[in-house]
Image: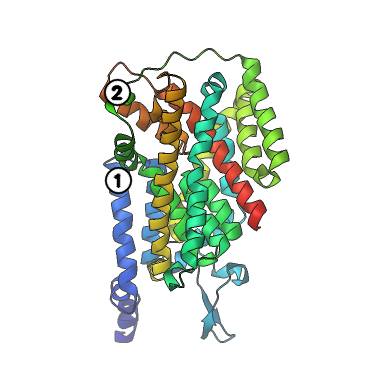
């Protein structure tokens, strides 16, 4: 009986936290609780952060709820560990490990893009086509971070020893697009870094309300932030129907590797704008989108096991990721300032920051800052133009990286 009690006590999470590297799991649980606080108390992207936080907490209490990496012989003795997910027997996958198959096979990112397309109005972009340039400008951050990570890899420092694929995954964080970051990192980055890349991308998406204001205030003047823009012209139904078709053809022919993301995004938008399949639109924009968000969030959180996550190389991803994100926002803002000058003050440069593809959070933050400067300044619809352009831009940028490296 005493032996049974001892075995039970030794199997508890409390004992595991204070043996070996278990303290790392305890740190990740604390980070998960912080994420819950930010989501529930501060309202920072709760639909994303709550599932991620729960997945993170569960896997660090009981790692086998994700995957048992141990390699066993016929007698059940541990003889090694697996390093390749594809080699692990299916019966060694826990609940979250089974859910993670949707990430490994790139199912969730593409389904989420269908839902995003079904909830997105490209009208502001169609009405003010030049704002597409601001979405493109923000993607400079992706390639700047990509080249920066490659340059750092030449230093010979182990924590910076990134492959070309790793650099591509890190760069895509600058697009503030979680599904795209997951798709690129799964295809190109080292398996041990995909968790850090995915978590960094989603974390910075959720922290847009914290990251954006100081960047905007640093790069714009009060006078620029108070600029009011003219009301957008009305866009016809025909234009909205043709837009996803034309974008799909152009983007997928020029950059075939972006077809999964662009195709799903524009498919979702087409069923919305066609007006003939309301049930499909309702399913894609509600049930499908939220179910996939839950599953993706839990799966991303489940990869954040303390003993493998808290490593110098993974932590450097967060440093480089925030750098990519800041560069992307800054490039969008500078593009906005240039457009403001060329139009003789008709464009509020703040909308350029919304060129990162955190839809619609980036546009909302820009609008709120504009409201603080002038309560009668309404920038939401103007910011949505570069914001949705950023979604297209990040998917195309991902396709370019996949074509160059994959």
Q: Where is residue 203 in the image (x, y as percent from the top left)?
A: 39, 49
Q: In this view, does 10 lie to the left or right of 197?
A: left
Instruction: Look at the numbered disc 2 and give the secondary structure of its residue.
Output: helix
Q: Which mark is residue 38?
A: 1
Within the image, what quadrant is residue 332 found in? top left
Q: Nearer the viewer, residue 70 or 393?
A: 393
For residue 177, say whether it is visible.
no
Instruction: Look at the numbered disc 1 and give the secondary structure of its residue.
Output: helix
Q: Residue 326 carries which label?
A: none
Residue that carries the numbered disc 2 in the rendered image? 223
Q: Which of 33 and 190 is in front in this view?
A: 190
Q: Where's the C terminus, which quadrant?
A: bottom right
Q: Nearer the viewer, residue 363 or 163?
A: 163
Q: In this view, does 136 lie to the left or right of 43?
A: right
Q: Where's the N terminus, which quadrant?
A: bottom left
Task: Please name the colour scheme applied to the rendered image.
Answer: rainbow
Q: Position of residue 225 (x, y in %)?
A: 32, 26
Q: In this view, does 189 lie to the left or right of 34?
A: right
How many residues crowd mark 2 within 10 Å: few (<14), some (14–19), many (20+)?
few
Residue 49 higher or lower than 91, as above or below:
above
Question: Marks 1 and 2, Cα distance to the nearest angstrom?
Answer: 32 Å
| In contact (CB < 8 Å): disc 1 and disc 2 | no
Within the image, what quadrant is residue 9 found in? bottom left
């Amino acid at each position: 009986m005493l032996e049974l009690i001892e075995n039970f006590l030794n199997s508890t999470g409390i004992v595991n936290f204070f043996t070996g590297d278990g303290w790392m799991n305890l740190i990740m649980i604390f980070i998960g609780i912080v994420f819950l606080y930010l989501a529930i108390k501060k309202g920072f992207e709760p639909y994303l952060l709550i599932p991620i936080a729960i997945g993170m907490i569960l896997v660090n209490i009981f790692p086998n709820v994700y995957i048992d990496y141990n390699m066993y012989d016929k007698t059940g003795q541990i003889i090694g560990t697996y390093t390749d997910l594809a080699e692990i027997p299916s019966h060694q996958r826990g609940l979250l490990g089974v859910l993670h198959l949707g990430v490994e096979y790139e199912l969730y990112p593409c389904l989420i893009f269908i839902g995003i397309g079904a909830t997105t109005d490209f009208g502001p972009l169609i009405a003010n086509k030049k704002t597409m340039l601001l979405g493109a400008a923000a993607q400079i951050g992706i390639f700047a971070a990509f080249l920066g990570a490659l340059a750092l890899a030449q230093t010979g420092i182990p924590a910076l020893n990134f492959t070309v694929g790793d650099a591509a995954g890190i760069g895509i964080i600058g697009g503030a697009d979680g599904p795209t970051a997951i798709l690129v990192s799964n295809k190109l980055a080292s398996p041990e870094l995909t968790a850090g890349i995915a978590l960094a991308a989603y974390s910075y998406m959720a922290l847009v309300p914290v990251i954006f204001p100081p960047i905007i205030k640093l790069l714009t003047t009060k006078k620029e932030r108070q600029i009011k823009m003219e009301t957008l012209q009305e866009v016809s139904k025909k234009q909205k129907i043709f837009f996803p078709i034309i974008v799909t053809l152009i983007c997928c022919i020029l950059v075939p590797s972006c077809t999964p993301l662009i195709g799903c995004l524009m498919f979702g938008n087409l069923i919305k704008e066609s007006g003939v399949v309301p049930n499909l639109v309702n399913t894609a924009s509600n049930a499908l989108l939220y179910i996939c968000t839950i599953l993706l969030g839990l799966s991303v959180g489940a990869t954040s096991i303390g003993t493998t996550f808290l490593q110098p190389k993974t932590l450097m991803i967060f440093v480089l990721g925030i750098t990519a994100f800041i560069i992307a926002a800054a490039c969008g803002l500078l593009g906005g300032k240039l457009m403001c000058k060329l139009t003789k003050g008709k464009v509020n440069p703040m909308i350029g920051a919304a060129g990162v593809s955190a839809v619609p959070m980036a546009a909302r933050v820009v609008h709120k800052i504009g409201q603080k400067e002038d309560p009668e300044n309404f920038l939401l619809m103007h910011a949505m133009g570069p914001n949705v352009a950023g979604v297209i831009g990040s998917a195309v940028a991902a396709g370019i990286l996949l074509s160059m490296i994959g």
